[in-house]
């Protein structure tokens, strides 16, 4: 992410936005999940956040390497983003199968892959929103400079 966003404040904003979205998702899914998860809400929230953060890290490593390889100015083409999300979905499904055949727990085999994929999706959403905000801010600065010279 250091290569994608130069400013530390931009990176902090992404992490705060990502944490807020993950927390919201954890709170929304808590009612359904706690019926099957017997260890309490705090442990559920910590495990859910770690699983989503793992999905975000996997997606981040793929996204930044492709971002540097493809282009530095226009961003990653939408086809590659869909390809990356498909790869994360495949990893999530394989993880679900492994967990199902290892523990024979249907809840665990659906819970972990869903949160892994959701973490990647949240990271992608946060980065795309931040890129749009920065581009809009840069356009406003350029418009201000053009109007100021006239």
Image (tube, helix red, strand yellow):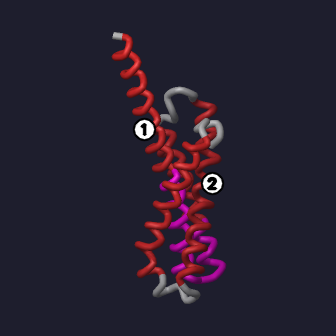
The residue located at (57%, 44%) in the rendering is: 9
Q: Is residue 121 left or right of residue 62?
A: left
From the image, tell me which residue sits under label 2.
57
Near-viewer residue (81 or 18): 18
Q: Is residue 42 magenta?
A: no
Give the image location of residue 131, x and y in percent. 47, 38
Q: Residue furthest top?
A: 150
Q: Residue at x 45, y 67 (%)?
A: 25
Cα gap from disc 2 to disc 1, whole angstroms: 21 Å
Is the residue 15 above or below the residue 40 in the image?
Answer: above
Residue 81's place in the image compared with 45, above or below, is above
- Image quarter of residue 147: top left
Can residue 65 be seen in the rendering of this structure?
yes
What is the x, y in percent for residue 110? 51, 73
Side of 119 where 68 appears, left or right? right
Label 1: which residue?
132
Is there any visible trace of residue 89 in the rendered image? no
Magenta-span inclusion, residue 103: yes
Which segment is the magenta one? 95-123
Query: Residue drawn at (53%, 49%), measured in percent from left and top?
Result: 14
Seen at 58% across and 87% down, the residue is: 39
């Amino acid at each position: 992410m250091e290569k994608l966003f130069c400013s530390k404040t931009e990176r902090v904003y992404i992490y705060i936005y990502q944490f807020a979205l993950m927390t919201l998702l954890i709170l929304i899914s808590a009612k359904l999940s706690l019926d099957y998860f017997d260890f309490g809400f705090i442990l559920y929230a910590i495990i859910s956040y770690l699983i989503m953060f793992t999905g975000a890290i996997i997606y981040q490593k793929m996204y930044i390497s492709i971002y540097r390889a493809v282009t530095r100015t226009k961003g990653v083409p939408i086809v590659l983003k869909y390809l990356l999300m498909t790869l994360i979905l495949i990893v999530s499904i394989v993880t679900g199968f492994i967990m199902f055949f290892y523990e024979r727990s249907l809840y665990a085999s659906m819970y972990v892959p869903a949160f892994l994929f959701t973490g990647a999706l949240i990271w992608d959403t946060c980065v795309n929103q931040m890129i749009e905000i920065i581009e809009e801010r840069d356009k406003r600065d350029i418009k201000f400079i053009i109007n100021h010279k006239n």
